[in-house]
Amino acid sequence: GEFAAPLDLTAAVRAMLGSELAAVAHQRSESGREVLKVRGCRLDAHSERFDLSLHEGEVVAMTGLLGAGKSEIAELFYGLRKPLAGSLELDGQPWAPQSPRQAIAGGVFMASEDRARGSLVPGFSLARTLTLPFLSRFSRGGFIRQGKEREAVQDQVQSLGIKCAGVDVPMETLSGGNQQKVVLARWLLGNGRLLILDEPFQGVDIRARREIGTRIRASASQRATLVICTDPDEALEIADRILVVRDGCVVAEYPRAGLQRDELLAQLAGVTPQPDTRPLLPQGATLV
């Protein structure tokens, strides 16, 4: 007889995900009080109920395969979608925003996955793109105080290392990585309670990814941060905790510390490793 080679679960799941995981090292943030509390939430008629909590001072990654429902869950918190069932609380108070405008007013900010559609306005400058949601902060008597606005923009440009010829250049002239930094900088201007970043590393090079990740973590102490990422490498690199989503439901939660990569890969694919049940051969015996 002849036995087939044992299944290499890690290789199989990596092939499904199309990614290799890199080494990750970062200092864990200290989590504070609960900012967002979700109980018995149901996304739609085809999904199961789930709970989750997000705390001040921590970065939580929500990951899953394409089409798992990650962005749809985040849209519940931002007024873009209503849950079929369940309750949401923000800082201990009921939270049911009817629109993104209402969510922003309540301190919940979201940078969408589609920069061009959700965050960028054709023809707008870097400065105006960055300050657009918070123009009232820079206005008096119906006029924008451009000096104050430019000072705030320059601080963010320097902090995030945004490469540009000046803050008045059109956004279309910036690279994808620098556009992504501007989108992040926009929401860091506000004193929000919850920052949701949907695929913040998409379409950026390795250096920009590292710079964006560093800035996300550096600002985490001021708010709860939820990062949505399909790439498990990104989840492992950025997060203190990782939530796994399948079929519109949070099915697993892991602290980053001690999490084995293979365990996360298997959970993402919905695969449970099976023990090798083949009989042991006596010492020295061979198969024919």
Image (cartoon, rainbow, N blue to C red):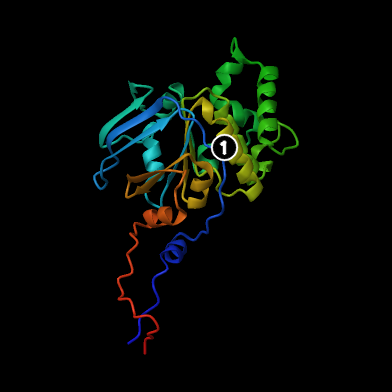
Q: Give the quarter of the figure containing the C terminus.
A: bottom left
Left or right, 155 with reference to 70: right
Identify the residue at image location x=49%, y=24%: 192
Q: Residue 112's spot in the image, x, y percent?
A: 49, 39
Task: Report the front residue among 241 and 287.
Answer: 287
Q: Quadrant of residue 103?
A: top left
Residue 264 in sight from this viewpoint: yes
Q: Which residue is mark 1?
A: 120
* 233 versus 277 height, above or below: above
- Callout 1 amino acid: Leu
Q: Residue 162's spot in the image, x, y percent?
A: 68, 37
As drawn, which residue projects farthest toward the right?
Answer: 165
As drawn, which residue projects farthest toward the top?
Answer: 141
* Number of marks present in the image shown: 1
Identify the residue at image location x=74%, y=33%: 166
Task: Report the front residue among 164 and 214.
Answer: 214
Residue 125 in sight from this viewpoint: no
Left or right, 24 with reference to 164: left
* 109 versus 207 height, above or below: above
Identify the residue at image location x=56%, y=52%: 23
Task: Report the front residue among 160 and 285.
Answer: 285
Q: Residues within 10 Å of mark 1 (few under 14, many from 20)?
A: some
Q: Residue 140's spot in the image, x, y percent?
A: 60, 11
* 87 versus 270 height, above or below: above
